[in-house]
Image (cartoon, helix red, strand yellow):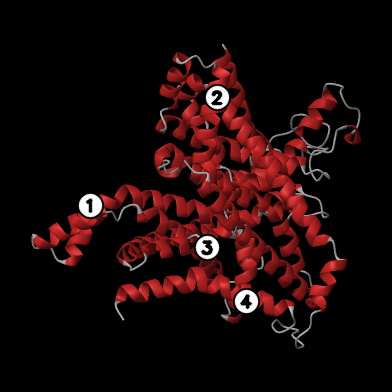
């Protein structure tokens, strides 16, 4: 009985955001004191498929940006984790990788902004990409460090001894072995970029209008309906990831 | 130079070079030696810090939010892990706890604004039930002086994550076996919880708790939506000063950024040493 009550309570607590956002997304005018919308309309959702829809463009921008960050950070992280394992003092490199996490993303953006301006990257996708990679690459590196154990190196050496070229050892031995961890790195770095608002907004000066930036803009304009639609779009990829594989979404505690 | 060394050099430049150069630039900016209106060395921005309580109040407000949020989230997570162990192992609980992790903090902020504000859903329900008779009749739960909305948002995001973490530690540390052993030796369930389970869980989770606290301390999205213009949390305070149109404000913003960055790095160093000293 107590168990059912607890489950129901938490299910309600966690479902309420989705219900309220869905109601807001289909309520063109929902004014105080009405507890439920007076009228429902799918207009905002239908407009999504219009060719010049800003939200759809924002969705595309966010997907592209987060995908590029995920792929670049995972590839770089894999190579860097290997280089760190073979470095003279791997512990120091690992400690260095934590530096971007010691500072909140917005503070990090504040610190690197003068250089982004000097590189003429302010307000551009390139500047935002550089800022996001500054957080995502060390994250992927730290995550993928656990792959490069003595065993992985021995597998690589064995493959080379048996006649594999370096490329064959990478593609046919190491990458299949590392795939579960690589997948987790891809998912998590994607979400890292997907969820970001502060760093993107500050480095892009509001010009790179990703979905999170749009949510904030709509909230500022008191356009709750479009803010809710954008919020629901933001929830879509993580929900799909959870549905596909929850272990990849959250690394198991070591 | 070997390709591996080139790779590490580029990495060092990205993860350490860029932020540390930024820190140096912020320091130079705060003494008038860098920035668009650099006029030569001046200590007036540092001196002005004594007269301006904004940064100190922001820091205190941030510490308040971070400590209360973390304490509440830890208490809730511990209560679930220690009080509902059987329920946590059964479906749909393990999946259910992942759901809040899907939510970007900006969306959580927007949702809580729509739920808790004076014209929000709870206020409408209380009006419908006759508990309140106007918008003003509903208590101020967002953009309030104590940061109730900000704390609520952080607790909602943190406690499911901490529950999953504590649950994993509970299983890995075989605390269920320890519970049986403690009971066999005559300990009450309360004694097992407070003298065995809580210390083990907190010590093993200390690094993650530290990072969660620092992340809450530097939160931006949630306080931007649910906070008041004064006092602001640290990240909002610095970003707001940096984005003002008056370029003469920039050195003060750089100074605030520099001080907060150095303060956070120092805090992490001290807390890391403390948690290592007390680690199991």
Q: In the rendered image, is residue A28 in sight? A: no
Task: Tell me, for residue B267, which label it has, or none.
Answer: none
Q: Which chain carries label 2?
A: B
Q: Mark 4 lies on which chain?
A: B
Judging by the rendered image, the residue that carries numbered circle 2 is B193
Foreground: A201 or A90? A90
Q: Mark 1 lies on which chain?
A: A
Mark 2 in CB contact with mark 4 (< 8 angstroms): no
Q: What element carries label 3?
A: helix
Residue plotted at (20% across, 65% down): A167
Query: Marks 3 and 4, Cα distance to the nearest angstrom?
Result: 15 Å
Query: Marks 2 and 3, Cα distance to the nearest angstrom?
Result: 36 Å
Q: What element carries label 1?
A: helix
Judging by the rendered image, the residue that carries numbered circle 4 is B24
Same chain, labels 2 and 1: no
Mark 2 in CB contact with mark 1 (< 8 angstroms): no
Q: Which residue lies furthest to the top in this view?
A: A1
Is residue B131 left or right of B180 when viewed as pictured? right
Query: Marks 1 and 4, Cα distance to the nearest angstrom?
Result: 42 Å
Residue plotted at (60% across, 60% down): A105
Across and down, in percent, residue A184 comes to 39, 48
Foreground: B154 or B79? B79
Is residue A236 left or right of B173 when viewed as pictured? right
Q: What element carries label 2?
A: helix
Image quadrant of residue A206?
A: bottom right
Say if A5 sits above or below A82 in the image: above
Across and down, in percent, residue A103 comes to 60, 60
Across and down, in percent, residue B128 comes to 83, 24
Judging by the rendered image, the residue that carries numbered circle 1 is A151
Query: Marks 3 and 1, Cα distance to the nearest angstrom?
Result: 29 Å
């Amino acid at each position: 009985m107590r168990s059912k009550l607890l489950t129901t309570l938490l299910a309600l607590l966690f479902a309420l955001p989705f219900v309220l956002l869905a109601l807001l997304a289909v309520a063109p005018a929902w004014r105080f004191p009405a507890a439920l919308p007076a009228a429902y309309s799918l207009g905002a959702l239908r407009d999504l498929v219009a060719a010049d829809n800003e939200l759809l463009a924002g969705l595309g921008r966010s997907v592209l940006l987060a995908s590029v960050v995920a792929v670049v950070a995972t590839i770089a992280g894999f190579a860097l984790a290997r280089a760190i394992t073979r470095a003279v003092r791997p512990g120091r490199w690992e400690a260095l990788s934590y530096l971007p996490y010691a500072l909140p993303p917005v503070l990090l953006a504040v610190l690197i902004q003068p250089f982004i301006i000097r590189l003429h990257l302010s307000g551009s996708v390139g500047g935002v990409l550089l800022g996001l990679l500054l957080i995502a690459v060390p994250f992927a590196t730290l995550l993928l460090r656990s792959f490069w154990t003595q065993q992985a190196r021995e597998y690589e050496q064995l493959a080379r001894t048996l006649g594999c070229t370096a490329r064959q050892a990478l593609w046919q031995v190491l990458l299949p072995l590392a795939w579960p961890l690589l997948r987790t790195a891809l998912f998590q770095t994607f979400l890292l970029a997907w969820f970001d608002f502060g760093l993107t907004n500050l480095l892009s000066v509001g010009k790179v209008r990703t979905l999170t930036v749009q949510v904030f803009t709509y909230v500022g304009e008191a356009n709750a309906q479009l803010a809710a639609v954008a919020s629901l779009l933001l929830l879509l990829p993580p929900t799909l990831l959870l549905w596909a594989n929850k272990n990849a979404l959250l690394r198991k505690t070591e | 130079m070997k390709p591996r060394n080139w790779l590490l050099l580029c990495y060092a430049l990205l993860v350490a070079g860029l932020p540390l150069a930024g820190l140096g630039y912020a320091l130079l900016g705060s003494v008038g030696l860098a920035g668009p209106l650099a006029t030569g060395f001046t200590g007036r921005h540092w001196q002005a810090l004594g007269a301006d309580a904004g940064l100190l109040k922001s820091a205190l407000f941030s510490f308040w939010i971070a400590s209360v949020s973390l304490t509440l989230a830890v208490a809730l997570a511990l209560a679930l892990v220690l009080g509902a162990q059987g329920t946590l192992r059964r479906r749909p609980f393990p999946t259910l706890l992942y759901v809040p992790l899907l939510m970007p903090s900006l969306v959580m902020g927007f949702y809580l604004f729509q739920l808790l504000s004076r014209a929000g859903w709870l206020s409408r329900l209380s009006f419908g039930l006759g508990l309140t008779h106007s918008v003003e009749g509903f208590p101020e739960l967002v953009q309030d002086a104590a940061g109730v909305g900000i704390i609520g948002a952080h607790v909602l995001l943190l406690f499911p994550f901490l529950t999953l973490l504590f649950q994993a530690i509970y299983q890995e540390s075989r605390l269920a076996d320890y519970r049986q052993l403690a009971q066999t030796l005559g300990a009450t369930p309360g004694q097992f919880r407070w003298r065995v389970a809580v210390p083990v869980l907190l010590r093993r989770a200390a690094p993650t708790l530290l990072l969660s606290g620092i992340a809450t301390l530097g939160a931006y999205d949630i306080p931007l939506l649910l906070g008041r213009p004064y006092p602001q949390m640290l990240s909002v305070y610095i970003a707001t000063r940096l984005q003002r149109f008056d370029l003469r404000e920039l050195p003060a913003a750089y100074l605030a950024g520099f001080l907060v960055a150095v303060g956070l790095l120092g805090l992490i160093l001290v807390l890391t040493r403390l948690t290592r000293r007390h680690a199991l």
